[in-house]
Amino acid sequence: MTSMQVLNTKGAAKRLGCSETWIHKLVSAGKLKAYIYDTDGVLVERKLDQKRQGRYLSFLVEEVDAYRPAVVRRPRGSKDKQRHLETQETPTA
């Protein structure tokens, strides 16, 4: 039996730098594969047409790391840091 790293929704969101809600939207759109545990405790791929509220979603680390959005966004808070640095650089007379 091979070992693989699995993340929950919160871990995947933290790894991608987005919210848990956004992770669910990516899964709904089919851009990110989600897995669930079946009744035997085996990790199986979640089907897109299968919508059940409250199901625990799992993600493979390799697939989360491989996901790259088409648009590269600025990290949260970087805009504020840039303004803060600009105000520090201006010399006062």
Image: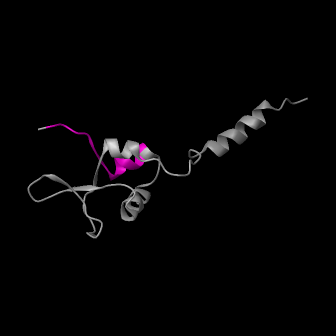
**Location of residue 82 with respect to 29 vertically, above or below:** above
Q: Residue drawn 72% across and 35% down? A: 85
Q: Residue drawn 22% across and 39% down? A: 4
The image shows residue 66 at horizontal and vertical percentages of: 39, 43
Residue 19 appears in which quarter of the rendering? bottom left
Please state the total of marks drawn on the protein image.
0
Check the picture and name the quadrant holding the C terminus. top right
**Location of residue 76 with respect to 92 vertically, above or below:** below
Camera-nearest residue between 92 and 19: 19
Q: Is residue 13 left or right of residue 4?
A: right
**Location of residue 5 with respect to 69 vertically, above or below:** above
Camera-nearest residue between 79 and 62: 62
Q: Which color scheme is applied?
A: one colour
The image shows residue 37 at horizontal and vertical percentages of: 17, 55
Residue situated furthest right in the rendering: 93
Residue 57 appears in which quarter of the rendering? bottom left
Instruction: Tell me, yes or no, whether the highlighted magenta stretch contains residue 6.
Output: yes
Q: Residue drawn 76% across and 32% down? A: 88
Q: Give the range drawn in magenta.
A: 2-15
The image shows residue 58 at horizontal and vertical percentages of: 27, 52
Instruction: Tell me, yes or no, whether the highlighted magenta stretch contains residue 59.
Output: no
Check the picture and name the quadrant holding the N terminus. top left
Camera-nearest residue between 64 and 52: 64
Residue situated furthest left in the rendering: 40
The image shows residue 63 at horizontal and vertical percentages of: 34, 46
